[in-house]
Image (cartoon, rainbow, N blue to C red):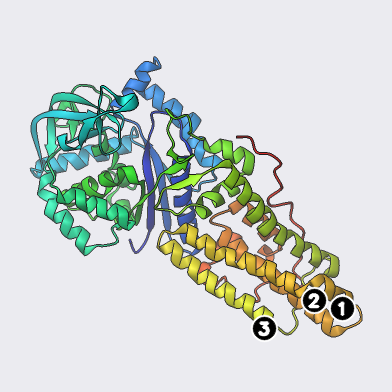
Amino acid sequence: MSDSTFYVTTPIYYVNDAPHIGHGYTTVMGDIITRWHRQRGENVWYTTGTDEHGEKVLRKAEANGVSPQEWVDALVETEWKPLLQTIDAANDDFTRTTDQRHLDGAQAFWTALHERGAVYKGNFSGHYSVGSEEFVGDDDVTAGEGDDEGFMVSKLDGSRVELISEENYFFRLSDYQQKLLDFYDANPDFIQPESARNEVISFVSRGLRDLSISRSTFDWGISVPWDEKHIFYVWIEALLSYATSVGYGNDRERFDEVWPASIHLVGKDIARFHAVIWPAMLMAAGEPVPHRVFAHGWLLVGGQKMSKSKANGIRPDELVDTFGSDAYRYYFARALTFGSDGSISWEDINARYHAELANGFGNLASRVAAMIGKYYDGSLPAAGAPTAAEQAVIDVVFESVAAADLAIEKIAPQDALSAIWRIVDELNGYLTEQAPWKVAKDAESSDAESDRLATILVTAAEGLRVLAVLLNPVMPKASAGLWHSLGAEPALGALAEQRIDGVAAWGQLPAGTIITKPASLFPRIEAPAE
């Protein structure tokens, strides 16, 4: 990665309709990863945004009786930007392909490649998928079945294709077949997970053809500066938003500071664009290639990929309105393996919410604060001598912090949460075994028992301190509530200032810290509506 900036991007989402939880899924995972790196104390930049050109957007706008610019403006302001607030995303930038900075940068990029001889004029005749805004080779087209009977469809994603014939400009993508294969071989972590890497290598090994980079039969897009009868093919300019949003074509100093991207997070259906076309474009321009492209799987509802035709799409606000943004973020990071397809259901979300969040984590925080309030008037006591039981807790904390940090580095948020939840389970088990409520009965007549009670509750409070820091990237609202409950800020500073590499150091909460019982972090939900 860049020495100065850890730069993460989501896909630049295609704005032909409102976002669904698939978009929220990618954005939340990127947000968790970047928040974690911020918690490490790193310089982080997190970009998301919208891809607003192309024939599909044009047709959608025409169907709604408005101009394409009016269509995308309305969707961005009423649907896409509000999504970020709904899921509590802390992105640093929101880029739009209709931004002037993007237009300037995209035109500058392709002008440079045109001048280098990497672009030439030709004629295209073949299949085009408006649904995925993709040129599809003859070998990847087949006759449709079922609802698609009578149409030709893409083998790549099942979308319908149309035959088109038009004069276009082409990028010499075929020149980069071996260069890409050599790059993949030299950089085995560039495409992840392994399944995506294998698919991309197989695709490139079959042979690459030169790629059309312009369209000349409609005008909703960025004009080709040396021939304004053409606009750039949507993917060809949209991919550049990762670079134009951090200064390419406008602020070279800023671009050199941030670029190359550390991680592009994408859905597996667009991995080829990011792992084949995009690096080839950058190689042609003499610019550094991103460090990693991570392709996650699909979200399945009832065993099927979400789609409007199946009426199984779920909006993020439907889940957040019921369970809250913290639980939404937790569920997608905990219940699914990032990189694989994963099934979701209301029943599973509800079950995990109550078992893991309300009863497991929330109740732990509540009862520790309640016992310190009851036995010590809310003032954290000084701990007595530790025993093997306390050392077992400390060992689990150290191991879990290291495991969670390594999992985030591997882009495996589900493994990070599994490691963190070992601490939750360990603390709950520790309290059950040590039974401080029983020790409290003997503490009135025994100094030893009094010291023992203090040790138990200080150990539990310290464990909660660690959890507040580790869970802050995942559940920022609950973590802030817990940090406040622990009275940690006066002594230790703001939650955002706590560092992952120092969180496991034991005994940071000083005696006398005022502990207050938090409002229920995860109140019970009676019956979420489907």
Displayed quadrant of residue 170: top left
Q: Earlier in the sequence, mark 1 or mark 2?
A: 1
Return the residue at label 1: 443
**In this view, 62 is above or below 486:** above
Identify which amino acid the numbered label 2 is placed on: Leu
Quarter of the figure that contains the C terminus:
top right
Counting other residues with Cα less than 10 Å from the Cα at mark 3, is it few (<14), some (14-19), or many (20 or more)?
few
Q: Which residue is mark 2?
A: 453
Q: CA separation, marks 1 and 2? A: 7 Å
Gap in Å between the C-alphas at discs 3 and 1? 20 Å
What is the crowding at mark 2: few (fewer than 14 residues within 10 Å), some, or many (at least 20)? many
User: Are the residues at dot 1 and dot 2 in contact (C-beta closer than 8 Å)?
Assistant: yes
Where residue 123 appears, x then y in whole percent?
A: 9, 29
The residue at which mark 3 appears reads as 388
Q: Identify the element where label 1 is drawn.
A: helix
With respect to residue 260, does 396 lie above or below? below
Query: Where residue 406 sits: x, y (%)?
Result: 44, 67
Q: Amino acid at mark 1?
A: Ala
First along the sequence among labels 2 and 3: 3
Disc nearest the viewer among 3 and 1: 3
The residue at the point 27 percent across, 55 percent down is 197
Query: Where is residue 505 shown, x and y percent of the image?
Result: 59, 76
Q: Secondary structure at mark 3?
A: helix
Q: Nearer the viewer, residue 146 or 522?
A: 146
Q: Nearer the viewer, residue 324 or 487?
A: 324
Q: Is residue 308 visible?
A: yes
What crowding class fits label 1: few (fewer than 14 Cα within 10 Å), some (14-19), or many (20 or more)? Answer: some
> Relative to residue 389, is residue 84 drawn left or right?
left
Count the labels in the image: 3
Foreground residue, 231 or 453?
453
